């Protein structure tokens, strides 16, 4: 009778070990695949922010060029830069400074640049990315 009970219990430890090891391996595989998914999403977000920032920079330089070429330039326009677009807000004149706001968006990422110029010689006072 004791031999029958011992034979019935001999596979219990092996079966339990296999179940625990299988669960741990599945959890590890799930965690690794999920981290790969989020890594791709982070790379896409980083790319979108880079495109947005470069487009806003190009638009800001274009606004500065237009202002140097024509000092009565008022901004307030949307400009196409390659496949993206950016907005130049109306240029604000404040005492002896000019203020330019430029914004651009790409795939959900948005970049805003605020530029302050000296009104007399159009020298750059500040160039800030707003968050």
Image (tube, rainbow, N blue to C red):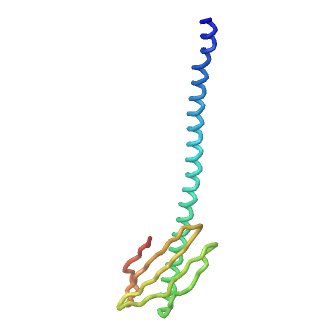
Q: Quadrant of the N terminus?
A: top right
Between residue 81 and residue 40, name the one nearer to us: 40
Q: Quadrant of residue 120?
A: bottom left
Q: How many marks?
A: 0
Q: From this view, report whether residue 115 is shown above or below residue 94.
A: above
Which residue occupies 51% across, 69% down? 53
70 relative to 112, above or below: below
Q: Indicate the quadrant where residue 6 lies.
A: top right
Residue 60 falls left or right of residue 1: left
Residue found 57% across the figure and 56% down from its top: 41
Query: Which residue is at 61% across, 11% downward?
Result: 5
Tell me residue 106's x, y (percent): 58, 69
Residue 112 x/y as whole percent: 48, 74
Q: Residue furthest left?
A: 95
Q: Considering depth in this image, is 38 or 74 the residue closer to the camera?
A: 38
Is 21 left or right of 120, judged from the image as shown?
right
- Residue placed furthest toward the front: 1
Q: Quadrant of the C terminus?
A: bottom left
> Toward the viewer: 31 or 43?
31
Q: Position of residue 57 (x, y in %)?
A: 50, 74
Indicate left or right for 113 with 38 as reference. Answer: left
**Residue shown at the point (60%, 15%) measured from the top left:** 9
Q: Position of residue 42 (x, y in %)?
A: 54, 56
Q: Is residue 89 above or below residue 8?
A: below
Give the residue furthest to the bottom: 72
């Amino acid at each position: 009778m004791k031999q029958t009970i011992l034979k019935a219990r001999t596979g219990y430890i092996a079966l339990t070990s296999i179940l625990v090891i299988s669960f741990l391996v599945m959890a590890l595989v799930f965690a690794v695949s999920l981290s790969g998914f989020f890594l791709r999403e982070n790379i896409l977000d980083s790319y979108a922010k880079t495109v947005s920032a470069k487009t806003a920079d190009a638009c800001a330089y274009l606004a500065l060029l237009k202002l140097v070429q024509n000092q009565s330039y008022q901004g307030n326009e949307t400009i196409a830069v390659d496949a993206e677009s950016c907005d130049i807000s109306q240029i604000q004149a404040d005492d002896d400074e000019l203020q330019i706001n430029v914004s651009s968006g790409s795939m959900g990422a948005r970049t805003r640049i605020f530029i302050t110029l000296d009104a007399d010689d159009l020298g750059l006072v500040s160039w800030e990315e707003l968050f």
